[in-house]
Image (spheres, helix red, strand yellow):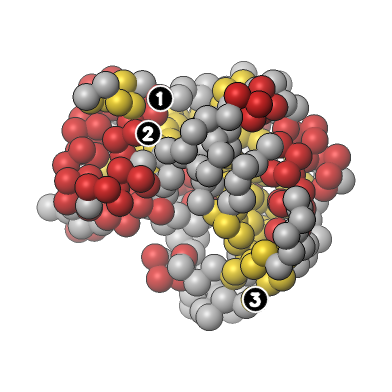
Amino acid sequence: MTRGDDPPRKRRFPAGPGAEGAEAISAVAVLGADDFPPFATTPADEPPEPFPAGGQPETPRRPYTLAIDAGGIGLKASVLDAEGRLVADRVRVSTPYPLPPRRFIATLAELVRPLPAYDRVSVGLPGVVRKGRVVASPPQYVTARGLGSEVDPQLVAAWKGFEIAEALAEQFGRPTRVANDADLQGLAVVTDTGLEFVVTFGTGVGTALFFDGVLAPHLELSNHPFRKGETYNDQLGEAALKRIGPERWRRRVMAALENFRVLTNFDHCYLGGGNSRHLRGVVNEPYSVVDNLAGIIGGVRLWDDTRMMGRD
């Protein structure tokens, strides 16, 4: 029996648009050639519904959260109400390279310009962020052209120790929290039942661990050796998928998931990120594939201190 045949698990937020809707993200095109070029938005062909289908839309409730999902290929954002419902179409821009912290912040500032007013900001990005400070540099952002290209030591130095939450709060003029992007995906989908594990497949691989709904400190498992002297990022990232094709990639994924199962003894595992679409209809319980929109919706739960281990 595939996961799709099982009774639905409790979700934190409305499911939102499916894979087709996720591809209809509003585009943001780079127009200039300066270090921080201007942007222009174009409407999505099929903009996502801000509220669940059926019945009359509910009145959005404050506080409004600007939620940003920063990936290695694209930067996406929207504004959510207190219930995690979209109150504006998502916007997107391709991730520019090279990407030092200040260019990252300036790019986000232009990305969110078309969005409505918000009360607070949540950002998910690769790497390890602890109390608003970058502890381990985002692996994609310290390279010349993205994951798989050469690492720039100057970018490593620029990102490591950077007070990212403080800098973003200054830019946006609103309270800001920053976490790993896989952590944000998990916050949107976990059911607060036992040990729940999240794996995201995009430019690289992300992981997050929850116990009874509480987020554990982030571990960069993707940087650990996996096979043939390479890491999970090397073997399962976007570059590897393009090189070996979906069938071989899926076999590698299943081997990786078994490693994670033995390591964590999870009760359930959620598979997210853009490339998780290649696993739909393939995995069985205790695995399930979740909507990539979770990377944005989880931004609301980042402000729930009861979900954060060790936060005062």
Task: Estimate how packed mark 3 is, as few (under 14), some (14 to 19) or many (20 or more) residues with alpha carbons within 10 Å.
Answer: few
What residue is drawn where x is 34% and y is 33%?
Answer: 234
What residue is drawn where x is 54% and y is 68%?
Answer: 25
User: Which of the labelled discs sits on residue 233, or is there none?
Assistant: 2
Tell me: 179 left or right of 252: right
SS under mark 1: helix
Q: Nearer the viewer, residue 34 or 259?
A: 34
Q: Position of residue 79 (x, y in %)?
A: 68, 59
SS under mark 3: strand
Q: Amino acid at mark 2?
A: Asn
Query: Which is nearer the N-term, disc 3 or disc 1?
Result: 3
Q: Amino acid at mark 1?
A: Asn
Q: How far apart in space, not on screen, are marks 3 and 2 (Cα)?
A: 33 Å
Q: Position of residue 120 (x, y in %)?
A: 77, 47
Q: From what the image shows, is residue 4 above or below residue 222? A: below
Q: Residue under circle 1?
A: 223
Tell me: 26 left or right of 121: left
Q: Position of residue 170 (x, y in %)?
A: 86, 40
Q: How far apart in space, not on screen, are marks 2 and 1 (Cα)?
A: 6 Å
Contact between marks 3 and 1 (CB within 8 A): the answer is no
Q: Residue under circle 3?
A: 42
Contact between marks 2 and 1 (CB within 8 A): the answer is yes
Query: Which is nearer the N-term, disc 3 or disc 2?
Result: 3
Q: Position of residue 213 (x, y in %)?
A: 48, 33
Q: From what the image shows, is residue 273 above or below residue 49? A: above
SS under mark 2: helix
Query: Which is nearer the N-term, disc 2 or disc 1?
Result: 1
Q: Nearer the viewer, residue 145 or 61?
A: 145
Q: How far apart in space, not on screen, are marks 3 and 1 (Cα)?
A: 37 Å
Kindly tell me whether residue 197 is visible in this rendering: no
Q: Amino acid at mark 3?
A: Thr
